[in-house]
Image (cartoon, grey):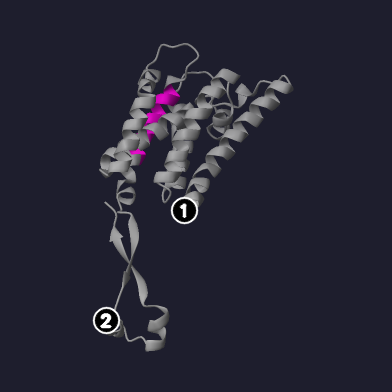
Amino acid sequence: MKKETKKIIYSIVIPLFVVMAMWIVKLVEFSLDLNFSKYGIYPLKVEGLRGVFLSPFIHGSFKHLLSNTFVFFFLSTALFYFYNRISFKVLAMLYIAPGLTVWLIGREAYHIGISGIVYGLAAFLFFSGLFNKRKILSIVSLLVVFLYGGIVWGMLPGREGISWESHLSGFAWGLLTSVSFIGESKRKFKKKTKITVSEEEFSNYSISNDVYKDYKYFYKEENDE
């Protein structure tokens, strides 16, 4: 139970930190009557590159921020919980790559918000669940579709004020990331099973009887399907 609690706490630390940072930025912007949109991604301009790193923390309104807060927190927590071994690599990829793509192909406007990362996380969790063919990860895939299946419409051009380029780039990189990490994410999880051995069996390991008395229980690893 303690191990599971630690895993849950670990899974929410980074998502919570990012969410707090987004809200602090918005509150500072609002309280000082500032506009941080100029720090977003502006395609093909050198100063626009700073937006690759800054834009996920900048939102046009509290409504925009609120809509991204819950979906980012849920999807990123799922990433750290179910794919903790590769979570930082995946998040780093989805943090940088979609932003650079938008900088290269986006319209001449400031692109802000964490939506690109959100689309990337949704795509990664969905396709990784399919590729892994593990029951729990497949359930996560279905849950992503059920909760956020409508995000596909956000990748289509035509809606004013919506950076469909960020959404499409995020989704594409989420798919590519799931493919590139398929070898690592498909490694079978291990679980330890406690077994008891006799003194005669234990003697095969060339360990003294005194040690046997203290360590007649040991663990073996089994694949967790």
Instruction: Decide whether residue 166 is among the magenta residues.
Output: yes
Task: Name which residue lies at 58% across and 23% down.
Answer: 59
Marked residue nearer the N-terminal end (2 or 1): 1
Could you tell me if residue 111 is visible in this image?
A: no
Task: Name which residue lies at 33% across and 44% down.
Answer: 180
**Residue 177 place in picture, x, y as percent:** 36, 40
Foreground residue among 212 and 97: 212
Left or right, 81 with respect to 190, comes to: right
Q: SS of the residue at dot 1?
A: loop
Task: Name which residue lies at 56% across and 24% down.
Answer: 65
Q: Amino acid at mark 2?
A: Glu
Left or right, 219 with respect to 84, comes to: left
**For residue 1, which numbered disc appears in the image?**
1
Instruction: Decide whether residue 213 is among the magenta residues.
Output: no
Could you tell me if residue 190 is visible in this image?
A: yes
Q: Which residues are magenta?
A: 165-177
**For residue 201, which numbered disc appears in the image?**
2
Q: How many marks?
A: 2
